[in-house]
Amino acid sequence: MRLASKFILIVAGILSVTLALNAYFFLRGQNRILEQQLDERGRVLGHLIALISPEAILGLDFLTLNEYAREISRQHDVVYGVIVDTDDRPLTSYVNGDDPRVRAGLGVDGPAPTHLQPPRLQALIQQLAQLPDVIPAEFPIVHDGHELGRLRLGISREKLAIQAREQLVQQIGVYAAIILFLSAAIYLVFKYSVMHPVQRLIEVSRDLGRGEFTLVPVRSGDELGRLGETFNAMTREIQREQAKLHYQANYDSLTSQPNRMLAVERLQQEIRSAHRQQQRFALMFIDLDDFKIVNDTMGHAAGDRLLTHVSAHIRARLREEDTLARLGGDEFLVLLPRLAQANEARDVARRLLEAVSEPVTLDGREVVVHCSIGIALYPDDGETVEALMANADNAMYQAKKPGRPPICFFTAEMNAQVHERLRLEQDLNKVLARGELQLAFQPIFRAGDGTYVGAEVLLRWRHPERGFISPATFIPLAESTGQIVAIGEWVLREAGRQLRRWLDAGLAPGYLAVNLSRVQLREDLEQLIRSVLSDNALPPQALELEITENILLDDHQQINAVLGRLHGQGLRFSLDDFGTGYSSLSYLRRFSFDTLKIDRSFVAPLCEDAEAAALVRAIVAMAHSLALKVIAEGVETRAQLEFLQDLGCDYLQGYLLSHPLDAEHFTAFLTRIARESQPWGSVAVVAQ
C-alpha cells in the first residue's frame, strides 16, 4: 500500500471515530431533551386533568372521568391514561384499543376492547408501564389540599426513537460528507506538498543508483525542503568522489596521463573505430633506458620528477587525438590513430626520441635519458588489444638489445621468438623435476706456478628434444620469471653435495665459485648458505660467491648487509665480469670482495690491442692496491697467459687451461692432478 493511501486511511479513521463520538453524545443529549419535553408534556396534561377532575371524582361522575381518560389516551405520544383513586383502583375503564402496545398487552391480534374491568385494566397498566419505549408518569388530583386520586400516564418513546433515527441519518450524511471533503482536501494537500517531493526524491535516488546525478528541485524551506537540500549536497559529494575515484582509477597520479586501464579502454575503442572505417593506427611502447641509475644515484623523488618532465615532453610532441599513457615504472604507451602509412609512425617515434632526450635539470644537475620504442601496427601486427600490446612490448624489448636501433617495428620473426620463449619458459618449469640440469666445473689455476686452486661452477641444461641450451638463453628467462630462485638453490645444494663426495673420496677440489642472481639476494640467502654448509659439513672457505656489477645497482644497504654478514662467517666473494657493466670504484670500496674477475672481452684482444692491454694492466694494479686478488677469464692462447703472468695476475681460467668438465671428468681431473705435479707447459694437456 502506498504512503498516501495509508495516510488517508489513518486520517479518515481518526475523523470517523471523532465524528462518531460527537454524534453519539449529540444524539444522547437530544434524546434527553426530547424525554424532558415528553415528560413536561405529560405534566401539563396531568395538571390539566387534575384541575378539572376533582368535581367529577367527588360527584362520582364516571362517564366524565372516562371521557377525560379517552381524550388523554388519544393524545399523540400517549399510550394510556387512567385515573385511579388513592387506593390505586381505576376510576376509569377506557383504553386506546388501536395502540399496538395495548393490543399486545391484551394478547389480541385484531381490534381490542376500549373498556376494561378495573382488575384487568390495572394489570394492563402495570404491564405497559414496564415497557422500555413507555415513559410512566403519575400526577396527583387534589381538592382543598386533599388528594382525591392520581392520573397515571404512559408516554410513548416511539416518536423519540424516530426522531433519533432521523437525526442519526442526517448526522451520518453530514459527517460522511465532511469526512470525504476533508479526506480529499488532505489527500490533495499531502499529494502535492508531500508525496510529489518524496516521489521526486525517490526518482533521483534511482537515478543516483544508476550513476546519473540529478538534483532535487527545492521550492520550500520546510523539512522536505531541507531534506531535498541535504540530498542535493549528498549527490554533489558523491559526484565529486566518483569523479575523484574515476580519475584515480584511470589516470596516473604522477604524470596526470591515462594509466594502463584507460589506455586499454581507448585501444579497444580505436580497434572498433578502425575496423568500421578500414583505417590503420600505431601502438608504441616506450621504455626509458637505464632509468634505474637515476633512482639509485639521485633518489626516487628525483626519478619521479624526471618521469613528469619526460611525460610532458612526449605529450607536447603528440596530436590532440593521440593518447599518451603511463603503464607503470618508466614505461609509456602512445596510441596514434588514423595513420595512412607506417612511415608516419616512424616519424613520430623520431620526434619522441628527441623529446625524451631533452635535458632535464634535477637538483642542480642536468640529466639526459634515452629510450627504446617498440611499434605495432593495426591490423598488420594484431587485431586485438592483447596481440597489439604484446607485439609492441616485444618490439620494444628488441629495440633495447645492444646494437639495435632505438626504434623497432614488430616483425613475424619476433612473434616466433615470443612463442619460442613461451615454450622455453614452460619447459623451464619442469626442468628440476625432470632432472635435466647438470653442473660443469671449469678449473682455476694460480698464474705463477699453474697450481690448481678451485673451479667455477657452471650450469648446463640438456633438453631432451633441443639438446644443449646455452645459459645465456635460459638464465635471463629464469631471472625474469623468478624460477632462478629454485634453480639457484639447486645449484648451491648440488655443488655442496659434490664437494662432499670429492672430499670423502680423498680428493682436493679446492673451492667452488658459484654465481648468484640478483633475485637470490632478495631471498633468505644466509639461511640457504648455512644449510648447504651444515648439511655437507663444509667449511665456509669451500664456497666463493660470484656477483656481477649489475646486481650492485640494487639496494646498496640491503646487499651490503647480506654480503657483510656472510663474509664475516668466512665466505669469500668475487666481483664477476668487471668492466662490462657500470664499473665503479665505489663498489669495491663499499662491498666486501676478495677477488676481482676480468671479463673475457678484455682478455681476448689483450695481445693485439694496446688500449685493451693498458686497461687490463690498470685493473690489475688497482685491484692489488685494494688488496684484491685478480682472476683473468677467457685465457685461450699461450701469449695471453704469458702476458697476464707478466702483469702479476693472480689466477687464470680459460679454454687454454681447461674446458668446463662434467662431474665425472672433473673427478678424473682431480685424481690426475693429485697424482702428478704439472708444470705450466703440460697443464692444458692434463685438463683436456
Image (tube, rainbow, N blue to C red):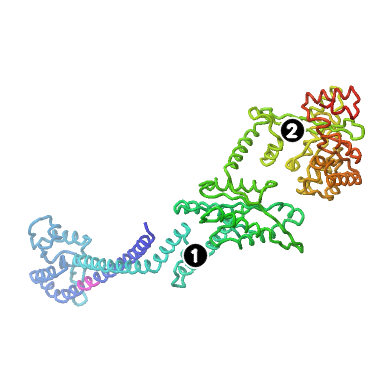
Q: Position of residue 12 (x, y in %)?
A: 34, 64
- Kindly identify which residue carries mark 1: 231
**Of the pair 528 and 305, the residue shown nearer to us:** 305
Quarter-of-image position of residue 452: top right
Quarter-of-image position of residue 246: bottom right
- Kindly identify which residue carries mark 2: 459
Which residue is drawn at the image coordinates 21% and 60% (left, top)? 131
Q: What kind of residue is marked 1? A: Phe
Q: Position of residue 10 (x, y in %)?
A: 37, 62
Q: Is residue 66 above or below residue 655?
A: below
Q: Which residues are magenta?
A: 36-42
Which residue is drawn at the image coordinates 55% and 45% (left, top)? 387
Q: Position of residue 163 (x, y in %)?
A: 21, 68
Q: Name the element at disc 1.
A: helix
Which residue is drawn at the image coordinates 92% and 32% (left, top)? 449
Instruction: Please tell me whether the stretch drawn in magenta is mainly helix, strand or loop.
Output: helix
**Of the pair 670 and 71, the residue shown nearer to us:** 670
Total number of numbered discs in the rendering: 2
